[in-house]
Structures are given as C-alpha cells and as structure tokens.
Amino acid sequence: MYNEKVMEHFQNPKNVGEIENADGIGEVMSEACGDSMKVFIKVKDHKVNDIKFKTYGCCAAIASSSIATEMVKGKDLNEIKRLTKQDIVNELGGLPNRKIHCSLLAEDAIKAAVKNYEEKNNAE
C-alpha cells in the first residue's frame, strides 16, 4: 500500500518533538479521520531555523509530517507559504488516493505556525 520512502518516514520520522519557546506554533486536526498535528518553528532571518512536530495519526499523516518538516527547514517564510499538499505527496513518491488528505495536515499545520509567528511579530 505504501512505498519505501513513506514507510521510512513513518518508521523513522525526522524532527519529532517540541521546541521550547517556539517562535510560531500551528495546530490542526482532520475532521475526516481525527488525525492531528502540532508544529513548532524557530525563525531566524525570515527563515525556518528549526522545526519540530507531534502528530497523532496514520502512517501517511506521520510520513507527511516528517517529510514536510524536512522540506521547509532552512526555507524562507514566503517560500513556505507556497507549499502545497501535492508538493508533499510528490516528495514522498506518492500516497494512495484515500490517504492524500493526510498530507493536508502537514501543509496546514506548517502554514498555521508561520501565520502564528507573523501575527506575534506583526510581519508578513
């Protein structure tokens, strides 16, 4: 059902945990399946310097969280705002159609963390 890359990120997820005194925090939940994700970011020079996540969910949700955090680490906030669930699915090498909604959690939580940072800092 899942390819090797998805299974690798599910079994050995990157960037799991919390960041104390995070500059931005985003939290989302899927009404469709009950999965949830919380993202913590540290920002320096308008770039995500560090990112951690906590996800409660299926294999696809955890793998999407892991790879999405890898994709945005070191990136400019404006670039991160253009991230799409399809970018995440493509980076994973695909997901079953019925699991693609799980990648939306990662996109939404990361963007919510960026928005939270910008609101705290009156930035855009």
Image (cartoon, grey):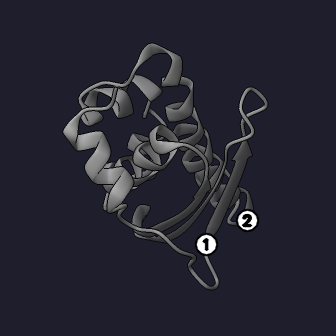
Residue plotted at (58% across, 53% down)? 114
Q: Residue furthest front?
A: 1
Binning the other alpha carbons within 10 Å of mark 1 as few (below 14), some (14 to 19) or many (20 upward) gives many
Asked whether the viewer can see residue 62, the reply is yes
Q: What quarter of the picture does the N terminus occupy?
A: top left
Percent across and percent down for residue 94 are: 30, 24
Sequence-first disc among 1 and 2:
1
The amino acid pointed to by label 2 is: Lys
Binning the other alpha carbons within 10 Å of mark 2 as few (below 14), some (14 to 19) or many (20 upward) gives few
Q: How many marks?
A: 2
Residue plotted at (71% across, 32% down)? 33
- Where is mark 2, residue-wise? 120
Side of 122 where 77 appears, left or right: left
The amino acid pointed to by label 1 is: Asp
User: Marks 1/2: CA distance?
Assistant: 8 Å
Percent across and percent down for residue 34 are: 75, 39
- Where is mark 1, residue-wise? 23
Residue plotted at (24% across, 33% down)? 3
Displayed quadrant of residue 39: bottom right
Residue plotted at (64% across, 84% down)? 21
1 vs 2, front mark: 1
Along the viewing direction, whichever of 58 and 19 lies nearer the viewer: 58
Q: Is residue 100 above or below residue 74?
A: above
Side of 115 where 70 appears, left or right: left
Element marked by disc 2 = helix
Displayed quadrant of residue 38: bottom right
Q: Is residue 78 above or below residue 48?
A: above
Pointers 1 and 2 in contact (C-beta within 8 Å): yes
Element marked by disc 1 = loop
Along the viewing direction, whichever of 49 and 121 lies nearer the viewer: 49
Asked whether the viewer can see residue 72, the reply is no
